[in-house]
């Protein structure tokens, strides 16, 4: 009965706390543990099961073959993995960290027997901690489940099913492609927001007093907790560096063009087209597609689906129901 | 009876259309004219007075000593000023263009006898045209009124009073300081949004499918009409170049630091501090302050108020009631 597999959440901040709530709301046995006394108290007061120690949580996971979810910032992952290796070495394991290669490398190094499939729900906000979470945080969000951490489709499906149970849709992707993509659409926005906020503040009180919608929106994520933003962005060094170089090249070209010809035409028009492509992808008609998970190339097909902007919206035995944008 | 001075709005897009509505809502005689048949029809259907030609609108302004509001994009300003010089050469004149030096220069060149005081309401959204406007668009927004276009405080007050009537508060600023400030907090955000949208789209459908809150917010203004964004940004070449250089320096430093040491600490922490300063300025306690407009240095005092992040919230005869942030 895969549908009732238990869920063991290590870390009860915004994301982990929301996974715990959503898993319980979906009818699963779920429990968590956190190093934060505040989050622990909050979760208990809200009626959720919190174990006193990581070892307790993992022991229960090992006993019931539950899915262990690493829901801590990247810098705290290694220590949790050492506990996994010690208490539940063959655990079904996933994570919700925003970068995938460093986590996969740590798993191979520290908990090589764990049955790991990477995950990353694309949601969140500038708040953090247990109180900020909710059972509906993942509703209609994209949740990446990596396709190159395992050859075992059943393992993949099991993690994907948890994401679907949480209300998300599943975007299958390879580790490196995920990291490159989120460097562009998730980590670069944080760096640009920080730069914009700094340039605005450099203008003193007059400039800040004049900051309206474009400044407010453009700097919103600069309000997130610096240590979380750093952990996220610094963890994706390779993906973010590539995105930064793309941005620096484009910004330098804009500067040069404005200075020499007075025109920002290419910059503004290309940006407008990019934003339109984003809006269109969200609004596009979607073809339904069935992917047989017992076919030998199922994981390849899933990866290809993700590359085309597609997603899995339902799992039904050995069948994945998917949607893929139809640009016609 | 300064309070009932008429308002003649040249251009009925988002901003001009909202000025017309707000002026009427404040009990003023107000009328407009537009080159767009669509906006003209919309305004008429909504019951507003629209004259057939710019000359008609200006003739009425000259006859009643009304305030003429230039509410067209920068590239269309010169042609309107030629009409002003021809039909209403000594008109009370202001504008709502997002950059002040080029407008002031055009006024001096083309309508040197007009009694001009520059203006800039800091609001708007990615929509445009008459239907997007509203009488409450300026509610609690900052509206810059320049302090160095005239020595005539009565003229200044008259424009400031229109802004207050529209529901805005008035931020006094010198032309060059305004342009430098909006380069940072209004024009740079548009260029960064365009760059981010382009970098995201470069990542293909997978990246766009993973774009969540930070990407959506960071690229929102890239959805604005490219010709309006270009007119706005290109019109403030000097102010925007300075802001771009600041941004390029900071982004390059972030790139270098990430590549060499793996740290984004300085970037993220400084950005977080900048955003906090912005939030604090908005939330800060404000000291009340009275500025006598018949004092010889009134315009200097108003300028100083703006530099400190202050604003005028009421005009009462020869007295301006102001608020200034109290950082204690």
Image (spheres, coloured by chain):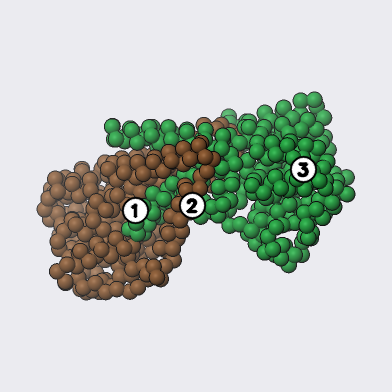
Chain colours: A green, B brown
Task: Point out the image quarter for the C terminus of chain A.
Answer: top right
Pointer 3: residues within 10 angstroms few (<14), some, or many (20+)?
Answer: many
Q: Which residue is mark 2?
A: B269
Residue B192 placed where, x, y %? 43, 42
Chain letter of disc 2 in the image: B
Distance between the alpha carbons at the discs numbered 3 and 2: 33 Å
Subunit under mark 3: A
Spatial CA distance of label 1 from label 3 is 48 Å
Q: Position of residue A17 (x, y in %)?
A: 70, 56
**Which structural element holds mark 3?**
strand
Q: Residue at 69% across / 49% down in the picture? A: A71
Residue at 18% in and 45% down: B106
**In front of the other: label 1 or label 2?**
2
Is B267 or A169 nearer to us in this picture?
A: B267
Q: Are marks 3 and 2 in contact (CB under 8 Å)?
A: no
Q: Does residue A183 appear left or right of residue A114 in this picture? A: left
Q: Position of residue B25 (x, y in %)?
A: 34, 65
Residue density around tag 1, few if under 14, some if 14–19, many if 20 or more, within 10 Å? many
Q: What chain does mark 1 sit on? A: A
């Amino acid at each position: 009965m895969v549908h009732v597999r238990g869920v063991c959440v290590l870390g009860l901040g915004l994301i982990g706390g929301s996974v715990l709530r959503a898993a319980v709301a979906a009818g699963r046995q779920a429990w968590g543990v956190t190093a934060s006394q505040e989050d622990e108290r909050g979760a208990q007061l809200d009626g959720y099961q919190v174990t006193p120690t990581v070892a307790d949580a993992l022991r229960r996971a090992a006993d019931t073959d539950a899915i262990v979810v690493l829901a801590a910032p990247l810098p705290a992952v290694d220590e949790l993995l050492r506990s996994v290796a010690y208490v539940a070495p063959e655990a079904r394991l996933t994570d919700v960290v925003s970068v995938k290669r460093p986590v996969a490398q740590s798993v191979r190094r520290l908990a090589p027997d764990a049955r790991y499939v990477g995950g990353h729900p694309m949601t969140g906000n500038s708040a953090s901690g247990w109180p900020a979470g909710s059972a509906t945080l993942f509703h209609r969000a994209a949740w990446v489940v990596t396709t190159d951490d395992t050859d075992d489709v059943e393992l993949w499906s099991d993690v994907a099913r948890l994401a679907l149970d949480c209300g998300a849709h599943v975007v299958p992707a390879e580790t490196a492609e995920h990291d490159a993509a989120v460097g562009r659409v998730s980590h670069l926005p944080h760096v640009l927001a920080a730069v914009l906020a700094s340039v605005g503040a450099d203008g003193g009180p007059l400039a800040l007093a004049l900051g309206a919608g474009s400044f407010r929106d453009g700097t919103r994520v600069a309000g997130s907790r610096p240590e979380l933003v750093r952990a996220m962005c610094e963890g994706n060094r390779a993906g973010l560096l590539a995105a930064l170089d793309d941005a620096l090249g484009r910004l330098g070209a804009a500067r040069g063009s404005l200075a020499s010809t007075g025109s920002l035409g290419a910059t503004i028009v290309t940006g407008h087209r990019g934003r339109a492509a984003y809006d269109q992808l969200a609004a596009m008609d979607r073809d339904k597609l069935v992917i047989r998970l017992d076919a030998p190339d199922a994981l390849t097909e899933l990866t290809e689906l993700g590359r085309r902007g597609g997603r899995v919206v339902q799992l039904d035995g050995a069948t994945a129901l998917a949607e893929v944008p139809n640009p016609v």
